[in-house]
Amino acid sequence: EDERPVQQAARMLGLQIEDLKKCMLVRKITVGKDLVETPQRGEQANAARDSLSKYIYMQLFVWAVESLNQTLKVDSSSKSRTSETQALGILDIAGFESFEHNSLEQLLINLCNEHLQQFFNNFVFRSELEDYAK
């Protein structure tokens, strides 16, 4: 197989190639006091790869938004704004899309949509509960 993708991923993540391959191709199971390592089946290895990819994209997205929001922070002594901070909000009204090959931008948009949907659901349900409590 072509190992260039795993070599590139390991380099970008600052990992040894064999360590990255092992974390996706071998699962560890604790049996009693023993730790048993067993090879992953193809679909399990693919799921591990996909999960790692999604986690990396999620962390990159969180980092990007937090960095931008930190950059947008307004000096509290400034008279030009009444609030202490500004915040970056991202909204894609087109919704979730799934392509055979997603670009980074599309994955970030999809992740943002998931977070917006979760926020909306929590807000609506909390508001409904408060209305019923009255």
Image (tube, grey):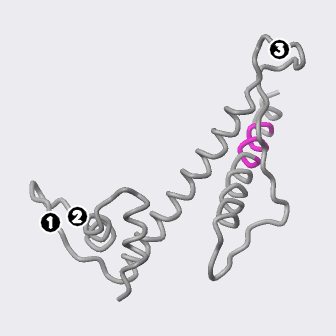
At label 3, the amino acid type is Ser
Label 3, secondary structure: give it. Answer: loop
Residue 26 lies, with reference to residue 35, above or below; the image says below
Mark 1 and mark 2: Cα distance apart in space: 6 Å
Can you tell which mark lies on residue 36? 1
Say whether disc 1 or disc 2 marks the residue closer to the N-terminus: 2
Is there CB contact under 8 Å for labels 1 and 2?
A: yes
Determine whether, in the image, residue 40 is placed left or right of residue 48: left
Within 10 Å of disc 3 (Cα), the crowding (few <14, some 14-19, many 20+) is few
At a point 30% along the width and 71% down the height, the residue shown is 21
> Residue 124 location, x and y as percent?
79, 44
Q: Position of residue 28 (x, y in %)?
A: 22, 64
Point 77% across, 35% down: residue? 87
Residue 113 image position (x, y, % from top left): 73, 57
Magenta extent: 120-127
**Residue at the right extreme, as displayed:** 80
Q: In the current view of this chain or complex, which residue is farthest to the bottom?
A: 1
